[in-house]
Image: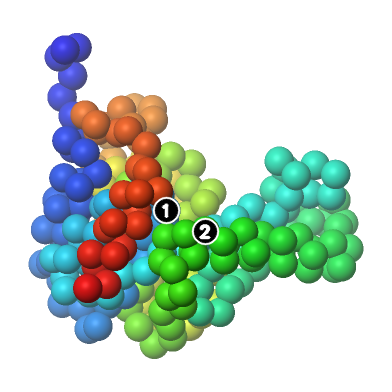
Amino acid sequence: MDGREFSFENRRDAGRKLAGELSRRDFDNPLILALPRGGVPVAYEVAKALGAEMDLLFVKKLGAPGWPEYGIGAVVDGDSPQIVLTEEIVRQLKPGPEYVEAEMQRQLKEIARRRATYLGNSQPIEMEGRTVIIVDDGIATGGTVRAALKGVRKNKPRKIILAVPVAPSSALEELRDECDEIVCLSTPTPFGAVGSFYRDFDQTSDGEVVSLMADKQL
């Protein structure tokens, strides 16, 4: 033992604590969207406590031409998948519309494969007009979450809430304009890595995601 104090025992513990905070609010038919894989155990506890529907929200990076690791944007899953481009990078690299469309379709195929792995034939739940609560196990830089928020906004929800157990205050400030409300239990300084605030931060397995999603759909 190294004597450190941890904010959370594991993701399920973080989810229960986050659910306790969210339960103080009055939501009308909320939809919980988990960012897989790490966000799923957290979101499961939130959805269970709120008696809410739960779905997965996949975000896949769009790679630059000839440089797939360099992102020009992202495609965000949902009942109406959305593309979110990083305008500054797009202006610099000038990828053609045909390339962007082909790369989007390539990533949508991967999203469909992953969704089938976790949810079988289940289709994404419609977001329009609903209060959508996006849940992850924590935020470091916020790049993936920013794309998720922008993509979800294009699906015309009534309200978007970002809910995470832990994040740096600087990242949250940069995300405030992308959502209607942020619920975060802890904003430690200095921050470091998300996993440093969990006693158990082992990678969430595909099997755990499948099990939790199956249980939530019963």
Given residues 32 and 181, the one toward you in this image is 32
Q: Is residue 114 left or right of residue 127?
A: right
- Circle on res. 116: none
Circle 1: residue type: Pro
Question: Helix, strand, or loop for circle 1?
Answer: loop
Please state the horizontal and vertical placement of residue 41, each as a whole percent of the image. 27, 52
Say above or below: 158 vs 86. Answer: below
Please state the horizontal and vertical placement of residue 90, each as a whole percent of the image. 79, 56
Given residues 41 and 148, the one toward you in this image is 41
Q: Is residue 12 left or right of residue 80?
A: left
Please state the horizontal and vertical placement of residue 96, each as a whole percent of the image. 88, 63
Mark 2 and mark 1 in contact (Cβ < 8 Å)? yes
Q: Is residue 41 left or right of residue 65?
A: left
Say above or below: 117 vs 9. Answer: below
Real-space Cα distance between discs 1 and 2? 10 Å
Q: Is residue 181 visible?
A: no
Which quadrant is the N terminus positioned in?
Answer: top left
Q: Give the residue at x 78% y 49%.
A: 64
- Circle on res. 36: 1
Tag 2 residue: 114
Q: Give the residue at x 46% y 74%.
A: 121
Q: Give the residue at x 80% y 42%.
A: 67
Callout 2 environment at 10 Å: few (<14), some (14 to 19), or many (20+)? Answer: some
Of the numbered discs 1 and 2, the one sitting upstream in the chain is: 1
Circle 2: residue type: Arg
Q: How is the image coloured?
A: rainbow
Please state the horizontal and vertical placement of residue 211, each as a whole percent of the image. 29, 56
